[in-house]
Image: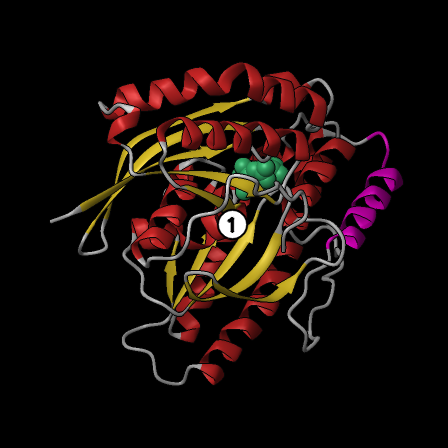
Amino acid sequence: GAKLRILGIETSCDETAAAVVSRLDDGTGRIEANVVLSQLDEHSAYGGVVPEIAARAHVDALDSLIEEALTRAQVKLADIDAIAATAGPGLIGGLLVGLMTGKAIARATGKPLYAINHLEGHALTARLTDNLSFPYLMLLVSGGHTQLVLVRGVGSYERWGTTIDDALGEAFDKTAKLLGLPYPGGPEVEKAAATGDEKRFAFPRPLVGEARLDFSFSGLKTAVRQAAESIAPVSERDIADICASFQRAISRTLDDRIGRGLLRFRTEFPQTDGLPALVVAGGVAANQELRRTLQSLCDRHGFRFVAPPHHLCTDNAVMIAWAGLERMALGMPADPLDVQPRSRWP
Ligand code: KG4
Ligand code: ZN
């Protein structure tokens, strides 16, 4: 059957990424190349992403990454049907680099350009990996976002819940920093928690019991700081116990918050064919405790838990290419070449 092929570009944060993805008439997709360059080493000394360093690193890396993606896919620019580049939300310097590059390629080749919302990329990835049909719920948990989103269709999203302060990944990173663990903190906290006593500290479970579907994690971070200060100097053992208790508080909180979201989904969509689905995306989706919590929640509520492979949960250009393909396949219009990047784009 006919096949669409798109070059994807992602530069919204600290990953420079390019991908070539194709889509067949039957709606299935194929990843032909997926190249991601993490800037972790450049930022780790600062304990977080430095926007100016990120933008410059994107400039340095993007052209050759695109070439590498094309080479691996064994295609030339002439074989590409369109270009999809992240236009927001994210760090404006990085967005400018990726979107301008996308525009330049579109201008030079005469191919259409799709300016993609990064969150839409995360939201639609499960349709590439798991052939999921609409509607479904998506939980995005990364360093910058914590959102529960109803995915009704391509271009049709409803945010049901969001964090009112820190993102979940940010809470992991800040907790790690307080305890003297390296950046990024999420994996370190998970590792330390494995040997800790999760009952030693009773950390708060913000917003649990409330009807709205929002999240809050800054109080948890404060409680961690107070716990650490109360026993200074902290031993390895203390760190393990704090991390385990921290993860438990997060699990209990998500169990309550997402549980309410699943109930709401059931109310709004009483009849779906087969099991409705909860999809997880974002870097924090690597956390095993979080996965166990979501899996058991889905089991109890009769939902299918869908977790795309880790490298497609974290930032990548496959998801941007795929979002472009979904739009293109539906005949949705491409963007004009004067489209502007948007650092904020809900
Ligand atoms: O989606 P992502 O790779 O990128 C951005 O948000 O830009 O997410 C990164 C976040 C970081 O906050 C990191 O600490 C967190 O995901 N993370 C984890 C784990 N692995 C990564 N958090 C908890 N447990 C993990 N195993
Ligand atoms: Zn992301």
Q: Amino acid at mark 1?
A: Glu
- Left or right position of 102 against 148: left
The residue indicated by pointer 1 is 289
Ligand 2 sits in quadrant = top right
Residue 57 placement: quadrant: top right
Which x, y percent locates residue 256?
A: 60, 69
Q: In front here: 340 or 146?
A: 340
Q: How many marks?
A: 1
Task: Name the residue rendered at 64%, 23% in the picture.
Answer: 54
Q: Is mark 1 within 8 Å of ligand 1?
A: yes
Q: Is residue 335 magenta?
A: no
Q: How is the image coloured?
A: secondary structure
Q: Considering depth in this image, is 287 or 117 the residue closer to the camera?
A: 117
Which quarter shows the C terminus? bottom right
Above or below, 106 against 325 in this view is: above
Q: Position of residue 118 (x, y in %)?
A: 53, 45
Q: Is residue 197 visible?
A: no
Res 64 seen here:
yes
Q: Residue 311 appears in which quarter of the rendering?
A: top left
Q: Position of residue 36 (x, y in %)?
A: 44, 26
Please name the predominant secondary structure of the magenta segment in the image. helix
- Report the magenta residues as a range: 217-233
Q: Is residue 278 above or below residue 174?
A: below
Query: Which residue shows up at 51% across the image and 50% down it?
Result: 289
In-front residue for pair 178/262? 262
